[in-house]
Image (cartoon, rainbow, N blue to C red):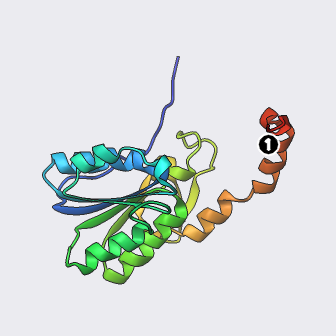
Amino acid sequence: MSCGGPRGVRSHTEGLKKVAVVGGGVGCAIAYPIAKKLHHLGAEVHSIVGFRNKDLVILEDEFKAASDVMKLMTDDGSQKGLVTNALEELIKAGNQYDEVIAIGPLVMMKFVCKLTKEYGIKTVVSMNPIMIDGTGMCGGCRLTVGGETKFACVDGPDFDGHLVDFDEAMERGTMYKEFETRKREEVCNLYKKEVK
């Protein structure tokens, strides 16, 4: 019997002295172990995590424990705003990061990279949001990085964020939106239930 499993390249955390870890939504579940590892290795960790609303916040205490600075951003909470607002404030306050690591929705990572490019800060993004099977078989995680075709599950998931074609990745993610919506409405029994 043979078995294939997730492929890819591990996240590099060694040798970094000061890092901003930016997580968005469920991407925080992946950003947290990175922040924790960096903290364990002695790096100064500034975590910026963002959620749509305060009811969706996860791992808040864990991020606080693994961070020298922790910023929580929500659309409806006391820290109203985007993760890019908090990151820019930290940069303007004089923080010089060896690297920014961003994990979350594609649009969030795109704008984190746009910001860090202005400041010349190396930025690594995790493209796991587009991965499907993790084995390199389906091709669903194909993306363009620096003009070359890559697969997030085999060549990544971490890439130089300044080289990722986010617009193409986001467009590919919506290719089947109409079909998915129609099928969900056809098949999902919850749509057939009357709300009382």
Horizontal side of residue 107 vs 22, given as left or right? right
Where's residue 84, x and y in %?
41, 71
| Residue 117 picture quarter | bottom left
Give the residue at x 53% y 39%.
135
Horizontal side of residue 180 vs 77, given as left or right? right
Q: Quadrant of the C terminus?
A: top right
Question: How many C-alpha atoms fall within 10 Å of the one at disc 1: few (<14), some, or many (≥20)?
Answer: few
Which residue lies most toward the left here? 42
Where's residue 22, x and y in %?
37, 60
Where's residue 18, x and y in %?
19, 63
Where is 106 relative to 196, above or below? below
The residue at which mark 1 appears reads as 184
Give the residue at x 60% y 70%.
167
Q: Which of 111 and 117 is in front in this view?
A: 111
Give the residue at x 18% y 57%.
68
Tell me the kind of residue under disc 1. Answer: Arg
Where is 157 relative to 106, above or below? above
| Residue 72 picture quarter | bottom left
Where's residue 178, x and y in %?
81, 55
Q: Which of 23 and 76 is in front in this view?
A: 76
Give the residue at x 19% y 78%.
94
Does residue 60 appear in this view? yes
